[in-house]
Amino acid sequence: MLQPKQTDIPAKAYFEMEDQAETKSEYFHGEIFAMTGASVRHNLIASNLIADLNNRLREKDCYVFPGDIKLQVDPDRHYTYPDVSVVCGDIEYAENREDIIANPIAIFEILSKSTSDYDLGTKFMAYRAIPSLRDYVVIDQYSVFATPFHKNEVGQWTLKDFESLDDAVPIRSLGLEMELKEIYRRIEFD
């Protein structure tokens, strides 16, 4: 996780600062963490995800959001910018703001060297408390590797790793499978 930009800030002050800021920051228990720029590979993967999801969900009552929409993870304690998120049905806005959603059904995070521990640890633990969330998918940007976590009917999270371009990753809450060759379309690995 990145070092905090500021600490001991109330959530309301964070919102005010974000409204005036030229860059995005995440909020975690009174600390504000500046978001860094993403690599070309990271952005291509995000674009591929968004294009594929928008195309495949266009006939459903679902909305696909890029990394510029803020997510309320825990009121007054935790706000993030997932790389891609999906809401199906009515969008629930947090804090009476149209720039913060509260009810994602699926979240996608693209792992980077600086955030992978956070994305797979603290952030995912916090995400699991979101009542609407059913699928959390992490995608490696340095190799072909994706792990979808799914919350089953009894509330347990299950996972399976996928690491071949021939694999299709199930996103059960959306009723679809995403082919890794589409997620990694036009990505070149060293």
Image (cartoon, helix red, strand yellow):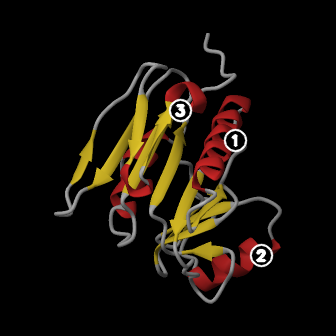
Name which residue lies at 62% across and 85% down: 12
Q: What kind of element bears circle 3?
A: loop
In the picture, the disc for residue 113 is 3
Query: Quick one: label 2, few (<14), some, or many (20+) residues within 10 Å?
Result: few
Residue that mark 2 sits on: 19
Name which residue lies at 67% across and 79% down: 15
Q: Mark 1 or mark 2: name the one nearer the start of the chain.
A: 2
Q: Is residue 63 left or right of residue 180?
A: right
Q: Farthest residue in the left direction?
A: 154
Camera-near label (3 vs 1) is 1
Amino acid of disc 3: Lys
Percent of width and height locating residue 30: 51, 73
Q: CA distance from mark 2 to mark 3?
A: 28 Å
Q: What kind of element bears circle 2?
A: helix
Q: Is residue 3 left or right of residue 151?
A: right
Q: Mark 3 or mark 1: name the one nearer the start of the chain.
A: 1
